[in-house]
Amino acid sequence: MRMPRVPRRGTALIASLVLAAGAFAIPSAQAEPKITVKDVEAAFHEVEVMNEQVNQLGVQVKQTQTEIDDISADIDSGMVLYTAQKDELSGAIVQQQLDAPLGPTANLLSSDDPEQFLAGIGAVRALNNTRADALAQFGEISKELKNRRAQLKDRKRALLKATKDADARRAEIRTRYEAAKTELARLTAAEQAKFNQSNTDVDFEIKASGRAQKALDFALSQIGDPYVYGGTGPNGWDCSGLVMKSWAAAGVSIPRVVGPQIASGTSVSMDELQPGDIVAYGDMSHDGLYLGNGRVVHAPRPGKSVEITGLGGFTRAARVG
């Protein structure tokens, strides 16, 4: 007679675990949060803020290099004078020892002529005073050379730091830019197309004259050129590079960076704008040139070209020229 099978303990345990596992739903991967056009705009804006910081570091590097060149030129000219005076003083001392080993006063003591003695004493004093003045001047030149060399060393340290800072910020810009492009790619095709669309039409009469007209003519002739970080032309621009070169074409020199560009002009309120005025964001991260009729010509961001836009976001203005 066959005995009934008794389930093995291991088999029963596995079965119970399978049943228990079936009671719990396996969680699905969490979906990424939906990206919006506003998020992408903010990402690109962050990069532009950094770009203007790099532009300012670039200005600092150029200024420091100019200072270094000026100090080096001063040192070179100072060395010429230093060497000439050193040679002159050395020659005078050597000649004095050849003419009067015991000093010029010793020769006068052997003179029997009182008038010759008194005249000689006066000459010796004058010679000593002249040499004292020459030595004092030589000392001042030596001191100035030492100070200028210390300044040169300091400016070279500053140049190295500014250059390293600029390189580090440029690397960060590239990283942030790639992150912004990744966010842009998460938008729908229609959203991406709209985001990258540039308005290039000026459908109204621009009422400008003089230098403002020349500046605007230059800016408008760049429409369609791509945005390039740090771009100052001739075929790629960032916002402040376009503004600077536009006014340069009109014969007006303004700084390289947005904040100093606004500071270089006369502040005007947004309801008093005239064509040619520089308009900027409040945080000094972006600027353009006002055309009139509520329109601005500017270099917007990578992926777009020089275009016409509205006054949205622009809250500061200055008049130059």
Image (cartoon, rainbow, N blue to C red):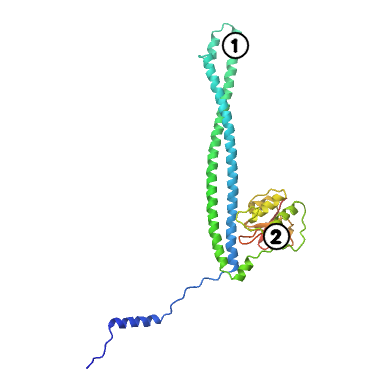
Q: Nearer the viewer, residue 111 or 152?
A: 152
State the residue position of label 1: 118
Q: Is residue 89 above or below residue 321?
A: above
Q: Nearer the viewer, residue 218 or 110?
A: 218
Sequence-wise first label, 2 or 1:
1
Residue found at the far left of this picture? 1
State the residue position of label 2: 296
Q: Is residue 203 above or below residue 320?
A: below
- The percent coordinates of residue 3 (x first, y second) are 23, 91
Q: Is residue 211 above or below residue 130?
A: below
Q: Nearer the viewer, residue 6 or 74?
A: 6
- The percent coordinates of residue 79 (x first, y second) are 56, 31
Name the residue type under label 2. Val
Residue at 59%, 7% (x, y): give it: 114
- The percent coordinates of residue 161 (x first, y second) are 53, 47
Q: Is residue 254 above or below residue 23?
A: above
- The percent coordinates of residue 28 (x first, y second) are 46, 75
Name the residue type under label 1. Leu
Residue at 58%, 29% (x, y): give it: 81
